[in-house]
Amino acid sequence: MADEGLTGLFDDPEEQRAYEEFCANQERGLEPFDLNAPALVCRWRMHNKRVPLLNRHIRALSQRVVQGEPLTHNMLSWAKQHVEWSLTEGSYTQRDGVLMLVIDVNGNAAMSVGEYEPLAATDRASLAERARLSQVEEGETGVAPEVLCAADGERLFVAAGEHGCGALTLVEQLAATRGMQVERASLDVVSAAPVVLLVSDEHGVVVASDLDAAAQVSAGADFARFLHDGVAKLF
């Protein structure tokens, strides 16, 4: 596997090394295969060797495209079954890490497991930048893995397209249990709101760490903490 195609997809060189070693040992059926340049990378949070939001992730995966084509039913079935089998039966030492699914430009796929690392920067600007980069991915694959949201006492504003990532579908459902309206808005509008939060398949709900004093005691902040706590219970 060429290193150049993987640059920027991993948090550190050790994670990339482990992933390349994993791929080198994988087989599909009876024939060995090598991944080509990655076209889609999904990072899903684990807990106790399970992926709590797996069914939501698979539904979101069904809305994604690779090289302009939707994923096949066989690929979706393989992904779900492989997660369930490999985490239960595999010899992974990480029980609460991150599962990574990579699909290459030819439609081949492999999975690996790594340690979970919390976000180093959680201020408003850093969360907005992560969301902006995810919107680039959304334009290429159809679904953003991380979405910036804003909360007030009555509504949840979401800077995402029609199809949400697995974590976002849960957040929207939690909002509905509180009688909150969910509205789509641009990233610029959302990032300028008093209370912002990042919804991520890998990190759950991350409330901006630099809310001003008034925002911290607002109904929007209470709602954001409710969403954070609700998703955090899964991990």
Image (cartoon, rainbow, N blue to C red):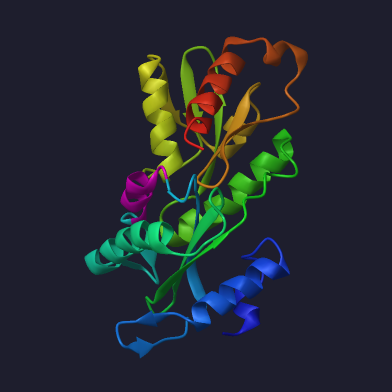
Is residue 117 magenta-colored? no
Q: Residue at x 44, y 38 (%)?
A: 168
Q: Seen in the image, is 137 located left or right of residue 33?
A: right
Locate the N terminus and report the quarter of the image it occupies.
Answer: bottom right
On screen, residue 28 above or below 205: below
Q: Is residue 153 visible?
A: yes
The picture quadrant where one finds residue 109 is: bottom left
Q: Is residue 190 above or below residue 214?
A: below
Magenta segment = 52-61
Can residue 71 be seen by looking at this rendering? Answer: no
The answer to which image quadrant residue 19 occupies is bottom right
Looking at the rendered structure, the number of numbered marks drawn on it comes to 0
> Residue drawn 31% across and 88% down?
30
Q: Is residue 47 above or below residue 87?
A: above
Q: Position of residue 110 (x, y in %)?
A: 44, 71
Q: Position of residue 90 (x, y in %)?
A: 44, 64
Q: Position of residue 224 (x, y in %)?
A: 56, 22
Residue sitting nearer the eye, 40 or 201: 201
The residue at the far left in this view is: 73
Query: Relative to residue 101, is residue 23 depicted above or below?
Result: below
**Identity of the residue drawn at 72% across and 23% down:** 211
State whether the magenta stretch is mostly helix, strand or loop: helix
What residue is rendered at 37% in x and 48% in y?
Answer: 54
Q: Is residue 57 magenta?
A: yes
54 with respect to 216 (left or right): left
What x and y, as percent, mark residue 132? 61, 48
Seen as rendered, the residue at the extreme bottom is 31
Quadrant of res 28: bottom left
Left or right: residue 83 versus residue 131 is left
Name the residue nearer the viewer: 90 or 36: 90
